[in-house]
Amino acid sequence: MSLGDFAPSRAFTLGVELELQIVNRHDYDLAPGAADLLRLTNRRKLAADVKPEITSSMIELSTGICERHRDVIDQLHEVRDALVEDAGKLNLRLAGGGTHAFQDWSRRRIFDTPRFKQVSQLYGYLSKQFTVFGQHVHIGCPGPDEALWLLHAMNRFVPHVIALSASSPYVQGTDTGFQSARLNSVFAFPLSGRAPFHLTWEAFKVYFEKMRRTGVVESMKDFYWDIRPKPEFGTIEVRVMDTPLTVERAAAIAAYLQCVARWLVKERPFEPQEDDYLAYTYNRFQACRFGLDGEVVDPTTAEHRPLRELIRQTIDAVEMHAIELHAERGLLLLRQALADPDTGTDAAWLRAAQAREQYLPEVVRQQCLRFEGVVTP
């Protein structure tokens, strides 16, 4: 399969994908309910799409093309409410969060599609361990070269959105010490990490064809990069975020990326270069391990800066773009999270719930209430 042409799209349009946990109402462990839930939800006419993920205890929703933060909120609310209602008919519930707090990966079932079976055969047990839950944000680009420029300019902001979305402190019933442990599972795949540094589509096509000839890849779906181009959509896809506990946080993070993208393209505060990636893996680790309290290295000045401070400065820098994009409410929610070091992030909220309850199934139950939009203690 060749790479194909890049389908242009309107600059800075948005698409949001969320992978959700399907849990039972008995002990709040993961439940293999994706097929039954899809049968119910596919009867509805929704602006958003719902489809299976690699294991049967997951489901993915994706919005249509959105112009602004309000569009994302409206579509996510509509599909969230529909899924919650249909899950209730099956005695199931849904939750956000980058990992399920105590599920046993060995009990997961691969969802029955040819692609998922192929992935399972190739990657073995890693496929079941890939029962982790992420948010992906697509940003529209008018052309392929513009998409690659934006992809590499965005790399400096990967730690920002990892920290803002971090919601996976628990794995297999253990506090990992990470704010986002989910990305450790993703990083185990051989085609994960950063995209190769190409700034023209012609150069990228040469790279892709070399990879295709090796038999390692057939399409862009085979790359698990943190940010990858999606030529059939005319977008770049930012893939590093944990699924937040609420759709409001998910929409706010999408708005942040949209505003940063517009600022980068319109104001060109710097030009992307290969040396931007010198500290990339270190900065990514800092965001995963320490979240907003991490320190990242500026690739140009070698200065170490607190992530919380950098995100505040970035929100200030993109303020006029947020007004133009009608994204102020989304960025306000993120400002509030930055101001609350105790429970302002989802990872902190989860740890506080566990400290209070001392029982992870109860924490997952409260995650469900939070995703449903019910106020929790």
Image: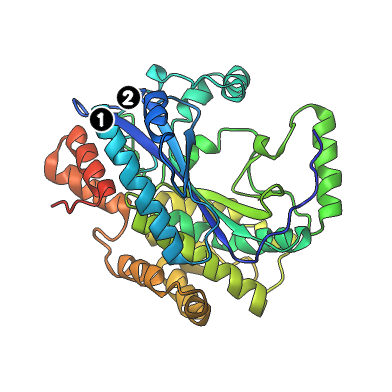
User: Where the N terminus falls, by quadrant?
Assistant: top right
Q: Which mark is residue 31?
A: 2
**Mark 1 crowdedness (10 Å alpha carbons): few <14, some 14-19, many ≥20:** few
Residue 164 visible within the image: no
Viewer-closest of 285 and 44? 44
Residue 268 at x, y percent in the picture: 67, 76
Residue 103 at x, y percent in the picture: 32, 27
Viewer-closest of 70 and 197? 70
Viewer-closest of 105 and 342? 105
Whichever of callouts 2 and 1 sits on the residue coming sooner in the sequence is: 2
* 72 relative to 174 in the view: left or right: right
Identity of the amino acid at label 1?
A: Lys
Looking at the rendered structure, the secondary structure element under dot 1 is helix
Viewer-closest of 355 and 267? 267
* 37 relative to 7 in the view: left or right: left
Residue 263 visible within the image: yes
Residue 37 in the image: above or below residue 83: above
Name the residue: 34% across, 67% down. 333
Residue 304 in the image: above or below residue 226: below
Looking at the rendered structure, the secondary structure element under dot 2 is loop
* Dot 2 and dot 1 residues touching (CB under 8 Å): no
Q: Which mark is residue 261?
A: none
Residue 195 in the image: above or below residue 123: below
Q: Which mark is residue 89?
A: 1
Identity of the amino acid at label 2?
A: Ala
Name the residue: 48% across, 69% down. 305
Residue 39 at x, y percent in the picture: 41, 27
**Res. 152 image quadrant:** bottom right
Name the residue: 59% across, 75% down. 263
